Image: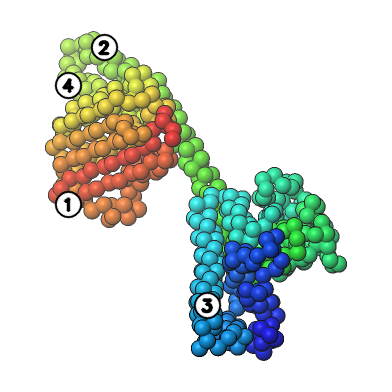
Amino acid sequence: MFERALRQLPLTPPIRKAVAALAPGALGPQPSPCWSFEAYREQVAYHGRRLAKLDAPAVGMARAIDEYVRLLREALPAPEKESGRELHLAADLWRLWITLSLNRAFHEVAEAEARTYHRLFQAELESRTLEELLGRMLEALAEYAQAERSAVFWLDRSAQSWKVLHALPEGAGPGTIPLAASSVPRFRRPRCQLVGRPGPRLAILPQWHRPEYTVWSVPLLAEGRFSGVMQFAFPKAYPWLPRERRLLETAAEHCSLAAEKARLTQRLAEKEDQVRRLAERLVEVEERERKRISSELHDEAGQALMCIRLELEMLEQKLPPEAAHLAPALASARSLTEHTITEIRRVISSLSPAALSQLGLPAAIRQLAARTQQLTGIRIRLKIGPLPQLPPPVQTAIYRLVQESLHNATRHSSASTIKLSLKAADRQISLNVEDDGVGFDVPAALAKPNAFGLTGMKERAALLGGEFQVRSQAGKGTRIEVRLPDPTRRM
């Protein structure tokens, strides 16, 4: 009677079948001779989730439950009779219980979908490569669908093959599969195929070609065209339900967009890596050129000026009395030559500090600070803590950062004191340079086209994976902070 009544309601046949299974009398044969409430509860939970995935309308469900209670009341004794009072109360309790059970089943389905979407979003945020992204998304969707096997295939058009990006269980399939003739157009839309039935085989992995298997296929798009497919295999006839298909289609669209984003991010990362390597190469070439120029200055110009100085000194000593009036000019030329030699030595020291390679970074910085203090008269207070044995490129970069910081402070700040701190702590190298000078507007200074000093310091720090900050205000001095990862202590 209930099944006949359901045919009068605006419900689809699959929904009518699932609703009919909610009746207590619909419980199938049990091993126990007695009717089992536990088995009935499991049946209601199963068909409740099925109704949720069938998108059963709430109004139709309520009408169906009311119709069953009406039929039940007609079959029971009158509620005025002592035997019927408790039975009618039981019918009301069943109505309340079945409503709560269906609400719980619908909530479980919605919660499973929300959990799946959350995992997809998390995979998109945390994945670094396309393979990792699609693998994590496949795991989330396979768990939602409760598939026995699953795989994501990417189309390699140049090699005419499928590339297996990820398969569950792990390693369940070869790395590449030859592309069957006209196999790509079949995946233009989502398909659910019972493998044993006639028609084109959509299962890409050969071991899925079993008569009893069901395969769900969800196409993936990239750059506006078909690029891959996700497949889920079940060891039985298992057609998908509307809500399952809708989630998979939405997830596939999300996967396609995320995959395209991951591909672009991966390409950008590769380009950034190329730029970084090129910048490191340029820095290396720059340091090599500095050494070459300093060597040539020392060997050529420096030696020539030393010879000129000696010649002038000898001329002064051998000057005859009748040419005594030339002595002041010779003395002035010799003094200018000596000053030029001093300047060349300073330039040579700036271009390629010998102390850095001979005595190490702390000694080179102390020598640089002493020379700067001597030339400018600005007091420089140093605080250099214990440092690890840093690689030469890192030592050179830190030295150049200190050199540029002192140069900027002595040239532009009008400071009376400069504080310089260098230490290693918390898995990083910290460099702080602070002065009590006039300060400046940092954004305006960085926006200038000729602000090579600050920009170069920022780029040097970035090449080592570090951070560079400059803080300054008019009349309140300047503070430069550099944080570099300690290359001797990897996580």
Q: Which color mode does the image show? A: rainbow
The amino acid at mark 1 is Ala
Answer with left or right where residue 447 lies relative to residue 438. Answer: right
The amino acid at mark 2 is Met
Picture coordinates of residue 169, whole percent (x, y): 67, 48
Picture coordinates of residue 327, whole percent (x, y): 18, 18
Answer with left or right where residue 71 lies relative to residue 164. Answer: left
Front-most of 38 and 391?
38
Mark toward the start of the polypeptide (3 vs 2): 3
- The 10 Å Cα crowd at callout 1, few under 14, some 14 to 19, many 20 or more, is few
Q: CB under 8 Å between callouts 2 and 1?
A: no
Report how far apart the C-alphas of labels 1 and 3 lie in the structure.
Answer: 84 Å
Residue 474 is marked as: 1
Query: Image point 34% across, 50% down: which residue?
Result: 450
Report how far apart the C-alphas of labels 2 and 1 lie in the structure.
Answer: 55 Å
Picture coordinates of residue 334, whole percent (x, y): 24, 21
The residue that label 2 is drawn on is 314
Relative to 46, does residue 426 appear above or below in the rendering? above
The residue that label 4 is drawn on is 328
The amino acid at mark 3 is Ala
Q: Quadrant of residue 479?
A: top left
Relative to 288, does residue 33 appear above or below in the rendering? below
Answer with left or right where residue 62 lies relative to residue 232. Answer: left
Front-most of 284 and 269?
269
Secondary structure beneath dot 2 equals: helix
